[in-house]
Amino acid sequence: MPHDLHALVRAAVRLVRRKTGRSYSLMQFTQEAFAAQLRVIAETYNDGRAIEPDAEPLEPGKAV
């Protein structure tokens, strides 16, 4: 993850903690972000149907 994006995520996590007074972690942020993107992809590319699990490894991606 690029450093600038990581810094923004940390700031967002701290903002949620400060504004709500509740515990909020980077892991929670990550899980929520993944779930939100999965919904977008299901709507956009899978006719609104849930995406089924796929255990086959992906090919390596390019470094950012």
Image (cartoon, rainbow, N blue to C red):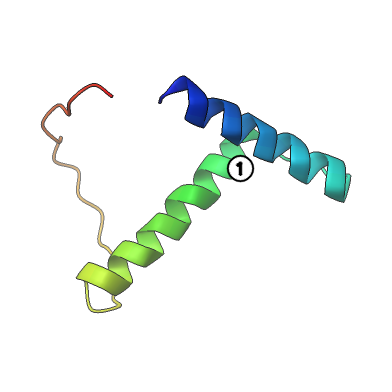
Residue nearer the viewer, 50 or 21? 21
Counting from the top left corner in percent of width and height, residue 26 is at 61, 33
Q: Specify the quadrant that holds the C terminus.
A: top left
Determine which residue is flagged by label 1: 28
Residue drawn 41% across the image and 24% down it: 2
Q: Residues within 10 Å of mark 1 (few under 14, many from 20)?
A: few
Give the vertical position of 61 relative to 28 (above or below): above
Residue 16 spot, x, y in % from top left: 76, 45
Q: Residue at x 40, y 56 (%)?
A: 37
Of residues 5 and 37, which is closer to you in this image? 5
Q: Residue furthest left?
A: 59
Amino acid at the residue labelled 1: Gln
The N terminus, quarter of image: top left
Q: Is residue 17 left or right of residue 42?
A: right
Q: Quadrant of residue 56?
A: top left
Residue 32 location in percent, x, y?
Answer: 54, 51
42 versus 7 height, above or below: below
11 in relation to 53, above or below: above
Q: Is residue 3 above or below residue 26?
A: above
Residue 29 seen in the current view: yes
Report the residue that reaches farthest toward the bottom.
47
Q: Quadrant of residue 28?
A: top right
